[in-house]
């Protein structure tokens, strides 16, 4: 039989260690997320040959420079990197929210900016009934924004 106090201490240490890891490595984790989003986007368009809609292009415009900005910020140890990353990430996040709402028909199709070419609501990919390309973009931007808020707090504590 296991000692409940030891389990609580072990759980606290794991939680504390994970939290500290995220705090200390927020920029690196955001960089990994931005690279995964970039590669995922390229996979969908270049391997699966899915043409991006207008909203997907706007989200790419917001996402693609993030990994370059993060690399430069990490190399230069710039304390304001979070600020340079969070601004386009919020713009992409807002676009992705609009895209998700459009995709799930919460916003009517006639409000879609995709009047010609590929439709913003075409169901190319769906995993587990809810993980879609717009949802993946929303998740990626949400993770990056969250990590930049963690980085902002870490930098403020150092000042």
Image (cartoon, rainbow, N blue to C red):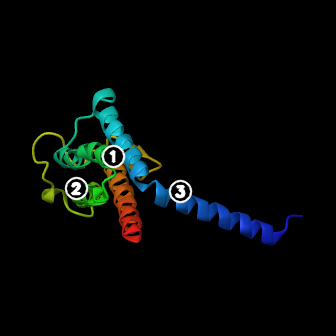
In the picture, the disc for residue 77 is: none
Q: Quadrant of residue 10?
A: bottom right
Distance between mark 3 and mark 1 Cα atoms: 29 Å
Nearer-N-terminus badge (3/1): 3
Answer with mark 1 or mark 2, whichever residue precedes in sequence: 2
Mark 3 touching mark 2, by CB under 8 A? no
Q: Percent position (x, y) of residue 67?
A: 30, 44
Q: Which residue carries the number 2 mark? A: 88
- Name the residue rendered at 73%, 68% in the picture: 9
Label 3: few (<14), some (14–19) or many (≥20) C-alpha neighbours in 10 Å: few
Neighbor class of circle 2 (other Cα within 10 Å; few <14, some 14-19, many 20+) is many
- Residue at mark 3: 21
In the picture shown, does residue 99 fall above or below 31?
A: below
Residue at the far right: name it: 1
Q: Is residue 62 left or right of residue 156?
A: left
Q: Is residue 33 left or right of residue 98?
A: right
Classed neighbour count for the residue bearing mark 1: other residues with Cα under 10 Å, few (<14), some (14–19), many (≥20): many
In front: label 1 or label 2: 2
Tell me the residue at 10%/48% (across/down): 115
Foreground label between 3 and 2: 3
Which residue occupies the extreme front position in the image?
A: 159
- Identified at 22% across, 46% down, the residue is 56
Q: Is residue 55 above or below residue 17?
A: above
Q: Nearer the viewer, mark 3 or mark 1?
A: 3
């Amino acid at each position: 039989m296991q000692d409940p106090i030891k389990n609580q201490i072990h759980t606290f240490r794991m939680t504390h260690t994970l939290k500290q890891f995220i705090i200390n490595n927020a920029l690196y984790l955001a960089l990994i997320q931005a690279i995964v989003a970039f590669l995922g986007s390229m996979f969908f368009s270049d391997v699966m040959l899915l043409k991006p809609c207008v909203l997907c292009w706007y989200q790419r415009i917001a996402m693609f420079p993030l990994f370059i900005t993060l690399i430069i910020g990490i190399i230069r140890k710039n304390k304001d990197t979070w600020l340079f990353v969070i601004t386009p990430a919020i713009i992409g996040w807002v676009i992705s929210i609009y895209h998700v709402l459009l995709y799930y028909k919460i916003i009517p199709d006639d409000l879609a900016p995709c009047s010609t070419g590929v439709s913003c609501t075409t169901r190319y990919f769906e995993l587990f009934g809810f993980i879609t390309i717009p949802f993946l973009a929303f998740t990626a931007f949400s993770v990056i924004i969250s990590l930049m808020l963690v980085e902002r707090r870490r930098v403020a504590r150092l000042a």
